[in-house]
Amino acid sequence: MDNNALIRRIIRSKETYMLILPGVIWFVIFAYIPMYGLTLAFKTYKANLGIFGSPWVGLEKFEYVFRDPAFMESVWRTLWINLGRIVFTFPVPILLALLLNELRLQWYKKTVQTIFTFPYFLSWIIVASVLINFLDMQGLVNGVIRLLGGEPINFLGNTTLFRPLLYLTDIWKNAGWTMIIYLAAITSIDTEQYESAQLDGATRLQTMWYITLPGIMNTVVVMLILAAGNIMTAGFDQIFNISNAATAKAGEILDIYIYRITFQSAADFSFSTAVSLFRSVINFVLLLLADRICKMLGSEGLFPPIRRTARKGRAILRAGGA
Amino acid sequence: MAEVIMNPEPARRTARRKRSIQGRIELLDIVLIVILAVLALLIIIPFLNVLAISFVTQQEYLKTSILLFPKEITLENYKAMFEDGRIWTGYRTTAILLAIGVPINMFLTTSMAYGLSRPDYPFKRFFIFFVVVTMMFNGGIIPMYLLMKQLHLINSLWSVVLAYGINAFYLIIMMNYFSNLPIALAESAKLDGAGEWTILFRIILPLSMPIMATMTLFYAVDRWNEWFNAMIFIRKGNLVVLQLALRSIVIDSQISQQLNISNIQTDKQFTEGMKMAAVIVSMLPIMCVFPLLQRHFVKGMLIGAIKA
């Protein structure tokens, strides 16, 4: 196509561009300029010169970052806490979906599903308020323990119980919603497989293990890769609201560290940006790495399933007409 | 956090098949019912406990160790909570945020989604890529804060409104929806001389009410739960959003309680009851729209949008 034809097509589409324009402006100002703002990691921020005008200093800030012991500690802490999430909380929604799928009372299934998904729609501030009330020294759980003659346990102010607390509250809030994703994946398993299993006399536990679970493996892998890509960031809202003075140190993940050095002490914005850039790069590298590893292990990795789900979604929308 | 908005309706066909072949209740069914009931109770009981505490007097609270169904109901805690005033301020700010924010969200998202969904215009792929990139990378809070400072929006609600203008995932969902509407309608209107904006408002939107309703609901819930941006951008006491008001009532006092262990309340006012009243009031609107949210994704309307 020559240039003139292109220009003619652009002019013909001008109304389409007008529709897109407000959104594009928003993205440029509030997504792309902040993205460009990450260059502050290589600059010294001067308030009077702004993001664009501040002078470049190269990698100097990163040298300071890596010299801060609190930084390295929070990096390792983040890694351990969020690896723990993958080990302890990641499998729970899969298990729940498998259990719920075996349930034959439809009304019961619906009710349970509704109850499980509700906490997901609340903010961590509300969830933390509810669970703090439930678990603190005067709370219901310790009430039961006292009634049974035990010593009350300080669930919230105890550093050794802090990680289990994080995993359990994470499950409490989010497992129900993630379960929905797996339930949706289960619907797309070919029913013929179940029928032939039935003919072969397989028990329900066997079908669950040999048909349902392999049937949702692709979704599991996608979720796993996404979780890997989130390892340096998961949990700010949760920890910010569930930790307290006694557990603050045990919960200082990288994002909390960034928040603390930026908004609570004398801020060096370039330093903080360097930390947050480091964090994003690690996340991205881990995402690609997990994708690569899954591909080596014979799975199709992250991108084809996403494309397929999008296609399927479109097909269902078309058929249903909503 | 990855979320997928999908059709959660589990295999109906599978269920039907199972029922027809084996109708009897096995041991497995009973075990399942019991396990799931216990888990469901673990979610319900903390809420019930909060609700109960919000309605009792301090005497009853101190007397009962497992408080789920209060014997006597009092509204004193709610009165105390409203007299405290912080929740009112929060409600007002969040109401303003919703009233300004959600229409802006919907305008930006709808017009861009419709524009992007048009079948044929130059650089279509580029613009979609332009959106998708923002799903993978973002500048984070520090550049955003400095940007707001440069725009002189610090301590103004506009910072919170504008920082969350378009959710790229919702945008993609909507775009997919619009792409699948029959284009013949739009084409004939175009021949009659209607402009794209007219087509959008007169033809497309009336056909898209379900998705518009869902998106409005999703944005409204996001706005209701919004606190982080507000905490960073707004330091003025009279513009505290609801979630932060709740945080200052419940969580901050919890943090100070952890420092001195003798925390049995002896003051005139029953603070625990007041706090729980605040939790209930902050949760109420979500509880009201939850059946709607539930129905919308049970209908299987938003399918297959992966939110990463």
Image (cartoon, grey):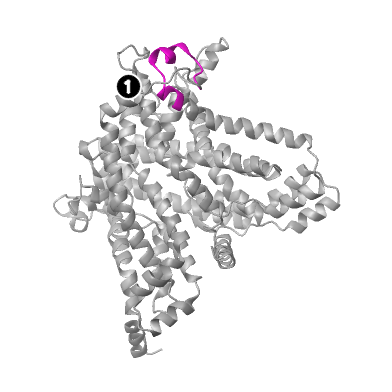
Quadrant location of residue B83? top left
Which of the pair A122/A106 is nearer the observer? A106
Quadrant location of residue B103? bottom left
Q: Residues within 10 Å of mark 1 (few under 14, many from 20)?
A: some
> What is the span of residues highlighted in magenta in the rendered image?
B51-68
Residue at left 42%, top 44%? A233
User: Residue B88: where, in percent of width, then height?
Assistant: 27, 35
For label 1, the SS is helix
Q: Is residue B138 above or below residue B279?
A: below
Q: How many marks?
A: 1
Q: Is residue A102 left or right of residue A295?
A: right
| Residue B56 among those drawn in magenta | yes
User: Residue A134: where, in percent of width, then height?
Assistant: 47, 24
Q: Is residue A245 visible?
A: no
Q: Which residue is mark 1?
A: B256
The quadrant the N terminus of chain A occupies is bottom left
User: Residue B35: where, in percent of width, then height?
Assistant: 66, 32
Which of the pair B209/A104 is nearer the observer? B209
Residue at left 34%, top 69%? A20
The subunit letter for the residue under badge 1 reads: B
User: Residue B179: where, in percent of width, then height?
Assistant: 48, 71
Q: Is residue A98 visible?
A: yes
Q: Amino acid at mark 1?
A: Ser
Q: Is residue B233 above or below residue A151?
A: below
